[in-house]
Image (cartoon, coloured by chain):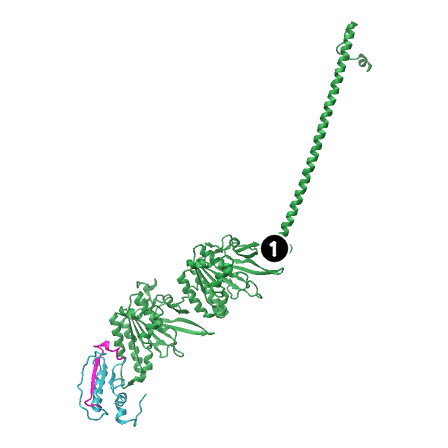
């Protein structure tokens, strides 16, 4: 886990001043090859980050087909899995992130952005 | 150890992988289907994890088949600690690259699900673990944890289906454990994905006593035992009791073994019990059943045989002390390793657990003689019917292995002496009855042989006496006043001895009188004979005198005649003529 190889790394981008603080978000996306789900997940994630965390996020993509030994470290079972490493606490989002609302809730971006206005956490 | 533990009947049936678990390979006819997944289901604490772990450890240590344990419920450390007490060193096996334990944590409240996903991560991990050590065996314990962690059951189901297919393609022999569900084998219906082999573990509690049971629910393409088999989990892991001997095909030995009591051997056709037969000694309390059992055990050890003694009422120490008092030294044989006690209360476990434990001990110790003292106490560990069934199985088990079974059974006072607490009389080859006889203010023991198959046995009742030199049998006194035992017998015997003495003395006296009489008479005879001979001598002397006188007279007359010149008279006078003529 510590020697995780970065792939498809996107350089941190400037923020739009939308999020609550200036801390850089560290996100890690586990995928398995270039499957449609993996590709979709990455695209969805990138779009959401650009919208909400512009300029202060890093996405590290780990392809388990190339680095299977990394799966155990972050307790990966499902693919794709997104791990929010920073800010603490660690969050884990499973799926292709096609449901933007739930992804934002999962990343705890939604609550910060719009409170609990018209949607409560699904769990 | 070689992999070729395949059964002889294997060629046509499925190739199998021995689990290495005692007994399980017997009832599955060689083990689990090679290269296929097997479902092991059971409720919590039924022993699923242990079964899986033992399968892997045996594979790694005995069959050179490395294994992967994917744990969903316990961490690597917890698992290692749990099985350390069984002598499994998971860390060592992991260092030697014979075992990989991968803990998979799926925590519901850490996971947000958005959109579709698959379980490729799990596949990747499993695949990686298998490939790093070249694993042949895989255990997934318990896959159902996934259902607790992930909500999309449609995805889970299709992914599990894919997983089982993938395992088959991968060619690993897998055990998948699952929780028992209400009304179905598993809570999440995993049985529909695994069609090759399903094993059900059960831990039932009846009357506060729990019994573990194992059943092969299905095993495609192979014959398997369909019964519920009791199994044990002890310090050596799992052992399943195969009930292989429900058939009557044991061979019968002609060899005889001594009962340890010479006189009893004499009663049993002169040679004792048959080897491999079942002997029952029944009697009321305190009639010497245990003494007879200990006597037999000691005799077996004396011959250099091994004896396993199951004591259900006394501790080994107590038993040894009591037997010392009748001159039987059991400690000696324990030290020599020929005698082993197994003392346990019958109520402590269920019948099946007892049976499984016996089976295990028999296999470990390989005794020639097995003593159950008393066998009837099993009724307390179950119902009468169950106890009978269990003892039937037990006796069959012993007979198949040619072990001589010696059982004692307590009959209570009110019952007929030839009934047993459990209906096993028909299973018994030699049945010895001990009875307490109370007459004349004392209680004595009597022994008789009720039956003994295949030998001419004595029909006599013998008095059974416990001396400080062991057991002695003596004839009972059967006379006008009935059967006498104990001191009455001794009194009777003394009386008879006294009478005999008196009779002997009378005879001697009469003989002495006769001798005296004979002596007296003989003396008188001698005296008379002396008198007679004196008389004879006197008479002859007189006769001689008379004859001498006559000669002298004749000579005088002849001298005188010479002087007168008289003629000589004729030498012989002629017959008078007058008689001749006078008749006419």
Q: For the C terminus of chain B, give its image quadrant.
A: top right
Rendered colour, chain A: cyan
Q: Which residue is mark 1?
A: B489
For the question of whether residue B464 can be seen, the reply is yes
Residue B364 image offset from top left, x and y in percent: 39, 62
**Image height of B565 relative to B2, above or below:** above
Depth order, front residue of B152/A83: A83
Q: B59 or B331, which is in the foreground? A: B331
Report the span colored magenta. A52-75
Q: Residue at x 64, y 56 (%)?
A: B481
* Chain letter, green: B
Residue ranking furthest to the top: B565
Q: Is residue B584 visible?
A: no
Q: Residue at x 68, y 39 (%)?
A: B514
Q: Nearer the viewer, residue B464 or B206?
A: B464
Chain letter belonging to callout 1: B
Whole-percent x and y of residue B38?
33, 72
């Amino acid at each position: 886990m510590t020697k995780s190889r970065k792939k498809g790394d996107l350089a941190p981008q400037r923020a739009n001043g939308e999020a609550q603080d200036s801390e850089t978000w560290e996100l890690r996306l586990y995928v398995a090859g270039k499957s449609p789900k993996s590709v979709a997940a990455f695209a969805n994630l990138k779009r959401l980050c650009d919208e909400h965390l512009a300029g202060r996020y890093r996405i590290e993509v780990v392809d388990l087909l190339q680095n299977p030994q990394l799966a155990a470290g972050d307790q990966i079972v499902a693919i794709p899995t997104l791990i929010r490493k920073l800010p603490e606490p660690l969050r884990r989002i499973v799926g292709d992130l096609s449901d933007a609302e739930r992804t934002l809730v999962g990343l705890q971006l939604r609550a910060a952005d719009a409170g609990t206005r018209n949607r409560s956490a699904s769990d | 150890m070689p992999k070729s533990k395949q059964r002889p009947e294997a060629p046509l049936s499925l190739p199998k992988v021995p689990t290495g678990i005692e007994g399980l390979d017997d009832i599955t006819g060689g083990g689990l289907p090679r290269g296929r997944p097997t479902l092991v289901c059971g409720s919590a604490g039924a022993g699923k994890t242990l079964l899986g772990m033992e399968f892997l450890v045996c594979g790694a240590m005995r069959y050179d088949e490395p294994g992967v344990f994917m744990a969903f419920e316990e961490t690597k450390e917890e698992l290692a600690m749990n099985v350390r007490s069984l002598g499994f060193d998971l860390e060592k096996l992991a260092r030697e690259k014979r075992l990989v334990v991968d803990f998979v944590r799926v925590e519901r409240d850490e996971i947000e699900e958005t959109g579709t996903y698959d379980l490729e991560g799990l596949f990747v991990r499993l695949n990686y673990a298998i490939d790093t050590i070249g694993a042949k065996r895989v255990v997934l314990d318990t896959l159902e944890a996934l259902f607790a962690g992930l909500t999309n059951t449609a995805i889970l189901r299709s992914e599990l289906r894919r997983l089982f297919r993938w395992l088959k393609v991968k060619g690993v022999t897998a055990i998948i454990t699952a929780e028992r569900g209400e009304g179905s084998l598993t809570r999440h219906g995993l049985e529909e994905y695994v069609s090759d082999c399903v094993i059900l573990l059960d831990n039932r509690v009846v009357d506060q006593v729990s019994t573990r049971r194992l059943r092969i629910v299905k095993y495609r393409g192979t014959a398997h035992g369909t019964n519920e088999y009791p199994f044990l989990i002890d310090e050596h892991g799992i052992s399943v009791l195969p009930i292989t001997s429900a058939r009557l095909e044991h061979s019968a030995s002609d060899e005889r073994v001594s009962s340890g009591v010479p006189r009893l051997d004499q009663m049993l056709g002169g040679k004792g019990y048959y080897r491999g037969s079942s002997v029952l000694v029944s009697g009321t309390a305190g009639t010497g059943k245990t003494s007879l059992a200990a006597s037999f055990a000691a005799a077996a050890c004396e011959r250099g045989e091994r004896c396993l003694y199951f004591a259900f009422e006394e501790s080994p120490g107590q038993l040894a002390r009591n037997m010392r008092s009748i001159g039987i030294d059991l400690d000696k044989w324990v030290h020599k390793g020929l005698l082993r006690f197994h003392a346990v209360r019958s109520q402590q476990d269920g019948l099946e657990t007892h049976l499984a434990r016996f089976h295990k001990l028999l296999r470990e110790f390989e005794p020639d003689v097995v003593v159950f003292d008393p066998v009837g106490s099993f009724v307390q560990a179950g119902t009468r019917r169950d106890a009978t069934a269990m003892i039937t199985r037990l006796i069959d088990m012993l007979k198949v292995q040619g072990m001589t079974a010696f059982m004692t059974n307590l009959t209570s006072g009110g019952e007929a002496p030839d009934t047993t607490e459990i209906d096993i009389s028909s299973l018994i080859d030699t049945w010895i009855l001990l009875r307490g006889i109370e007459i004349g203010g004392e209680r004595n023991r009597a022994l008789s042989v009720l039956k003994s198959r295949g030998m001419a046995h004595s029909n006599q009742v013998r008095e059974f006496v416990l001396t400080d030199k062991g057991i002695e049998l003596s004839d009972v006194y059967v006379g006008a006043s009935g059967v006498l035992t104990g001191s009455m017998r001794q009194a009777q015997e003394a009386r008879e001895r006294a009478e005999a003495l008196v009779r002997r003395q009378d005879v001697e006296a009469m003989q002495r009188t006769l001798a005296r009489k004979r002596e007296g008479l003989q003396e008188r005879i001698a005296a008379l004979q002396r008198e007679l001979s004196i008389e004879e001598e006197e008479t002859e002397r007189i006769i001689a005198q008379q004859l001498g006188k006559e000669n002298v007279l004749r000579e005088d007359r002849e001298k005188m005649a010479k002087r007168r010149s008289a003629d000589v008279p004729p030498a012989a006078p002629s017959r008078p003529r007058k008689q001749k003529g006078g008749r006419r």
